[in-house]
């Protein structure tokens, strides 16, 4: 017997804004956060389009006393801190951060020793300007890098805490410090599957009683020259739409041609039903199933039959004790690449049969791009909102559908639709990890 | 299948699935064969040497604990074709996992359901492709009147020419787990955690939770990591975390000694086969030990310092004991995190004292990091294997280089010499940068 686990808070930071409500509104209005990047001159790369979080200062999301720590934060860490603050605000949790910021009257309403964290992270890219500036001081002769000179004096130009910006677990460390979460803590690093795996594991942690509240999800930024270059080397960047970001990422569409590198994150609050009820929390939905799997044919290419993805979905439905015909809403991953989308579509059809084309589906990467380890949690949060609001929002750029078939997306105005069960899936573009989560409308 | 109690971190341990260790393999600076390395550890040998993987001749630290003479094809004859492009991390992981798989008899196992076989690694990121990376960074750097800056257009031209697609994506920390899934046809849950120095202990703990709950029957778990590359050593040197005893590198790793001055960077992999007891017994597997306790916490204190009272470490150790349904006095041996940094060893000792009380003086504690160096994400996996072997042979590996007692570290660290002892229950601690704490407890298997 497991404890029931409910979703009580949603915190997101995306190219469409920060906070679940503004992001939800922007998605309803068919907004798109993808455009030529401003963070750096991308004109030497195959695509100049990216998804940047607008008007974002990490100091709005941490206590004043923590501001000095901002100098040891990579962008990925900053995004995680924004998501965390949004999530606990949204959940009505009074954490140390909100009390110290003066947003809530103390004492905190969550026991630190029962408050856990499970945060997915990517391969955090070194700040290229910072590192290149330091490396450039170790030239000998001019124009070429000398490892001898680097060891002797060049490395002194890096700040002593340089490494701590880029350790993947620093997202969870900063979040747990700021919000005082001392219970089980983990960092999952499985590419785009990271968020779902982190949420799934946190679900287990709360269900078995090792924590009462868990903040979980993921965050990543690919908005740096290295992030773009790596995707370009892999042949994944969408290029066909040129400078028009609003048409660049096209999940499941006939003319899809790749991903848009982006940044963002999502952290959600999972809570035991008893804990949520005791504090009178708003309950968005109940998390009822989790399944994970690996591709075994290849760690680098998607499976044309989508077997691993289907296996994760089936495991999650079995875990939830939910029959396939109860699924009423699809949360697709929809990367926008030719082969990954074909693989995912095959999986949905394999699991849902004919219903795959009949029940409503949501895919939001046309609006927010690929947020790496943060993707899954943003999509999970949006899907949870859709279930809660009984609204299926439009999925940008999902037309014209691929001639081999697609899912049932909404293309124009949002539609009212009551679903009781939604399935959300994500998978690593490289690595072969797949994960699925099943969410159910909450009933006491 | 047995169901799990609602409070697995609690005392109802009787009705949950039991998780046992049925295989193990490692790649270490002292070799890559279980028995040979174990003999060296009991003899107090050290794997540290001047750094040869790159020219570290002008770095503050000239030495490291490297894996030597390693060829993946010695373990996987078809590796060049099947695992082309695998990073050093992934290669270590494949070799160690193959040894573990074979030692568990899984290469001979019939009717293994692939969807019930999972992977849970604490795998590190692969090293940056240093030469083209640096060439692009330096070549793209412009110092002009308006100030120096990276010309990202020039950088892109150099980077796209110099970098290689395979070497780039093989750096992702989930790659070793992906290769393992293909190598062993493991279609079940597949995770990689990267909680710094605590990663593989955490991986084994979470894998144990997955099997207990029934999400998998067999999991290859452990860790793999190499940070012995120019930017890895730079990062730790800048943090002043590494020992700089360049004249006496063989005795540079000095856990719990008063003259310790930092850890020694090592590399390698340690992999274990975790298995549901009934599954193991049904196939007639040889059970090496049972995993009975796991605790994970966050210090939630500072990214640069451990909580001065060892708050998070104490909580992790207590959670593991509770999970195992054990009192501190049941623990015979603690494989310490014992990095050899001033702060870690002092606070770990304090934490053990706080939890163990009077028993703290009686429990044997040692750090094999004195001989192997610090394998970062891989440390916990390798160290747990030494616990399995300690139980098997009733022998405790020593903490070498222990010569000057530190008043802050006043427990029994099995100084310098291995020794026989009654060892039925072992605890293994791993604490990561930023305040990640993980503790495992294993015990001699009895039905």
Image: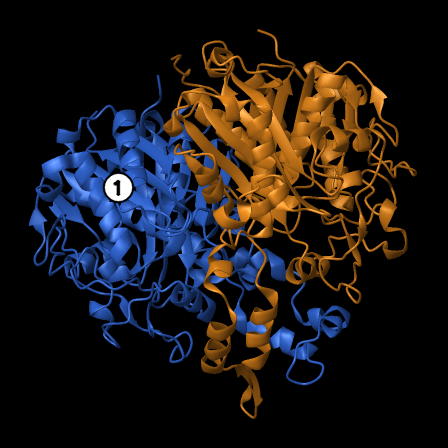
Chain colours: A blue, B orange
Residue B350, position as x, y percentages in the image: 74, 32
Nearer to the camera, B421 or A310: A310
Write down the quadrant of residue A133 in the picture: bottom right
Q: Is residue B179 visible?
A: yes
In the rendered structure, the answer to whether residue B427 lies left or right of residue A295 reads right
Residue B307, position as x, y percentages in the image: 65, 41
Write down the quadrant of residue B239 in the picture: bottom right
Residue at the outermost right position? B403
Q: Quadrant of the N terminus of chain A?
A: top left
In the rendered structure, the answer to whether residue B331 lies left or right of residue A232 reads right
**What subunit carries mark 1?**
A
Q: Which residue is at a point 82% across and 49% down the rendered structure image?
A: B261
Nearer to the camera, B43 or A268: B43
In the rendered structure, the answer to whether residue B374 lies left or right of residue B93 reads right
Residue A183, position as x, y percentages in the image: 51, 34
Rendered view: B323 above or below B347: above
In the rendered structure, the answer to whether residue B74 lies left or right of residue A368 reads right
Q: Which residue is at a point 84% across and 37% down the rendered structure image?
A: B45
Judge the density around disc 1: few (<14), some (14-19), many (≥20) Cα neighbours within 10 Å: many
Q: Look at the numbered disc 1 and give the secondary structure of its residue.
A: strand
Pointer 1 residue: A424
């Amino acid at each position: 017997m497991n404890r029931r686990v409910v979703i009580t808070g949603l915190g997101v930071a995306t190219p469409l804004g920060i906070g679940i409500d503004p992001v939800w509104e922007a998605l309803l209005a068919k907004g798109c956060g993808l455009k030529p990047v401003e963070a750096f001159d991308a004109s030497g790369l195959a695509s100049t389009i990216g998804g940047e979080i607008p008007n974002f200062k990490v100091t709005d999301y941490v206590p004043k006393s923590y501001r000095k720590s901002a100098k040891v934060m990579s962008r990925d860490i900053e995004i995680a801190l924004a998501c965390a603050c949004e999530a606990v605000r949204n959940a009505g949790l009074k954490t140390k951060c909100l009390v110290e910021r003066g947003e809530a009257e103390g004492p905190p309403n969550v026991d630190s020793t029962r408050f856990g964290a499970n945060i997915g992270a990517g391969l955090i890219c070194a700040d290229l300007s910072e590192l290149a500036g330091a490396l450039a001081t170790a030239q000998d002769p001019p124009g070429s890098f000398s490892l001898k000179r680097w060891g002797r004096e060049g490395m002194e130009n890096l700040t002593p805490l340089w490494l701590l910006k880029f350790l993947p677990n620093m997202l969870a460390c900063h979040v747990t410090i700021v919000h005082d979460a001392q219970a089980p803590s983990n960092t999952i690093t499985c590419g785009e599957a990271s968020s779902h795996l982190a949420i799934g594991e946190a679900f287990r942690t709360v269900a078995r009683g090792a924590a009462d509240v868990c903040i979980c999800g993921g965050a990543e930024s690919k908005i740096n020259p290295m992030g773009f270059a790596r995707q370009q080397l892999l042949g994944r960047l969408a290029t066909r739409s040129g400078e028009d970001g609003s048409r660049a990422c096209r999940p499941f569409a006939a003319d899809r041609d790749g991903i848009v590198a982006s940044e963002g994150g999502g952290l959600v609050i999972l809570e035991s039903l008893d804990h949520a009820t005791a504090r009178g929390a708003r309950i968005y939905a109940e998390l009822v199933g989790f399944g994970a799997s690996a591709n075994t044919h290849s760690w680098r290419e998607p499976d044309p039959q989508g077997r691993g993805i289907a296996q994760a979905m089936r495991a999650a439905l079995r875990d939830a004790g939910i029959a396939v015909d109860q699924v009423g809403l699809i949360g697709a991953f929809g990367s926008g690449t030719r082969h990954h989308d074909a693989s995912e579509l095959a999986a949905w059809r394999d699991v849902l049969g004919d219903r795959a084309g009949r029940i409503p589906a949501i895919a939001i990467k046309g609006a927010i791009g690929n947020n790496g380890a943060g993707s899954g949690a943003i999509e999970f949060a949006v899907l949870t909102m859709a279930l809660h609001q009984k609204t299926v929002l439009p999925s940008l750029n999902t037309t014209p559908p691929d001639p081999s078939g697609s899912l049932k997306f909404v293309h124009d105005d949002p539609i009212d639709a009551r679903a009781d069960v939604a399935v959300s899936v994500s998978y690593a573009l490289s690595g072969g990890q797949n994960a699925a989560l099943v969410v159910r409308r909450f009933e006491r | 299948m047995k169901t799990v109690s609602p409070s697995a971190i609690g005392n109802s341990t009787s009705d949950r699935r039991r998780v046992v260790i049925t295989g193990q393999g490692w790649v270490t600076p002292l070799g890559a064969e279980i028995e040979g390395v174990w003999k060296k550890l009991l003899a107090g040998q050290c794997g540290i040497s001047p750094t040869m993987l790159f020219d570290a001749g002008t770095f503050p630290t000239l030495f490291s604990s490297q894996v030597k003479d390693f060829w993946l094809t010695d373990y996987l004859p078809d590796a060049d074709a099947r695992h082309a492009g695998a990073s050093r991390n992934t290669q270590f992981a494949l070799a160690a996992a193959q040894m573990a798989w074979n030692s568990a008899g899984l290469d001979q196992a019939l009717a293994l359901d692939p969807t019930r076989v999972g992977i849970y690694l604490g795998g590190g990121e692969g090293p940056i492709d240093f030469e083209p990376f640096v060439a692009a960074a330096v070549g793209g750097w412009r110092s002009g009147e308006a100030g120096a800056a990276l010309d990202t257009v020039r950088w892109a031209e150099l980077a796209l020419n110099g970098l290689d697609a395979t070497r780039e994506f093989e750096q992702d920390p989930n790659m070793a787990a992906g290769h393992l899934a293909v190598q062993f046809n493991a279609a079940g849950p597949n995770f990689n955690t990267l909680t710094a120095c605590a990663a593989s202990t955490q991986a084994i703990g979470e894998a144990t939770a997955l099997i207990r709950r029934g999400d998998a029957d067999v999991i290859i778990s452990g860790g793999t990591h190499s940070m012995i590359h120019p930017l890895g050593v730079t990062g730790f040197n800048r943090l002043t975390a590494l020992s700089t005893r360049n004249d006496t590198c063989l005795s540079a790793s000095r856990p719990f000694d008063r003259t310790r001055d930092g850890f020694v960077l090592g590399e390698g992999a340690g992999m274990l086969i975790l298995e549901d007891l009934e599954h193991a017994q049904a196939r007639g597997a040889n059970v090496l030990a049972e995993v009975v306790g796991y605790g994970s916490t966050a210090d939630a204190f500072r990214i640069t310092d451990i909580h001065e009272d060892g708050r998070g470490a104490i909580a992790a150790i207590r959670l593991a004991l509770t999970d195992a349904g054990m009192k501190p006095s049941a623990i015979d041996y603690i494989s310490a995190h014992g990095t050899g940094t001033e702060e870690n060893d002092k606070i770990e000792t304090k934490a053990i004292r706080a939890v163990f009380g009077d028993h703290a003086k009686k429990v044997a504690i040692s750090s094999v990091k004195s001989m192997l160096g610090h394998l970062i994400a891989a440390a916990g996996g390798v160290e747990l294997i030494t616990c399995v072997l300690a139980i098997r042979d009733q022998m405790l590996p020593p903490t070498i280089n222990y010569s000057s007692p530190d008043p802050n570290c006043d427990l029994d660290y099995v100084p310098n010499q291995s020794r026989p002892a009654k060892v039925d229950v072992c605890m293994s601690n791993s604490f990561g940068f930023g305040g990640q704490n993980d503790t495992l407890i294993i015990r001699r298997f009895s039905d």
